[in-house]
Image (cartoon, rainbow, N blue to C red):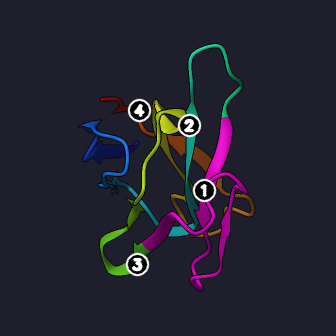
Amino acid sequence: QVQLVESGGGTVQPGGSLRLSCAASGTIYSVYSMGWFRRAPGKQRELVASITANKSTKYADSVKGRFTVSRDNAKNAVYLQMDRLNPEDTAVYYCNAEITREVGVWSPTNYWGQGTQVTVSS
């Protein structure tokens, strides 16, 4: 089994910063793309940022220039540095990773963290 454990969520004032961390553990052969999704109350889940094994990144338009996604392949970890946060960033953030567990598996499986709450308010 594979588990994704998240940390770093909390409450911050507008304009503040938070750094989310996520590490994958368990039986892992290879980790492909990793990223972060979020779901705000009354909203659909959306992709916030993703990063490939080669460090190519993608961002939602709403967070470009404010968020930075990075990863540490040796630790099977992904991070999300969030700067200049605003109330619209309030949501539950979920870590995601595409992982194969053994040799011979053609397609990776998506694994998810439990989610961590980020609240931006005065």
> In x, y percent, where is residue 71?
42, 73
Q: Which residue is mark 2?
A: 38
Tag 4: amino acid: Gly
Which of the two marks, 4 or 3, is nearer to us in this view?
A: 4
Point out the tag, 4 or 1, that comes first from the N-terminus. 1
Residue 69 located within the stretch drawn in magenta = yes
- Mark 3 or mark 1: which is in front? 1
Q: Residue at x 40, y 78 (%)?
A: 73
- In 3D space, how far apart are the residues under numbered discs 4 and 1 (Cα atoms)? 19 Å
Residue hosting label 1: 63
Q: In the picture shown, does residue 11 fall above or below 28?
A: above
- Nearer the viewer's eye, disc 2 or disc 3? 2
CA–CA distance in space, label 3 to label 1: 24 Å
Residue for badge 3:
73
Q: Are marks 2 and 1 in contact (CB under 8 Å)?
A: no
**Residue kind at label 3, given as amino acid type:** Asn
Q: Quadrant of residue 56?
A: bottom right
**Mark 2 falls on what kind of element?**
strand
Residue 40: where, in percent of width, then height? 56, 25
> Label 2 crowding class (10 Å Cα cut-off): few <14, some 14-19, many 20+?
many
Q: Is residue 68 left or right of residue 3?
A: right
For the residues labelled 2 and 1, the Cα–Cα distance comes to 12 Å
| Image depth: mark 2 or mark 1 in front | 1
The stretch in magenta equals 46-70
Q: Residue furthest bottom?
A: 54
- Residue 115, disc: 4
Q: Secondary structure at mark 3?
A: helix
- Mark nearer the N terminus (2 vs 1): 2
Question: Mark on residue 111?
Answer: none
Nearer to us: label 4 or label 1: 1
1 vs 56, left or right, is left
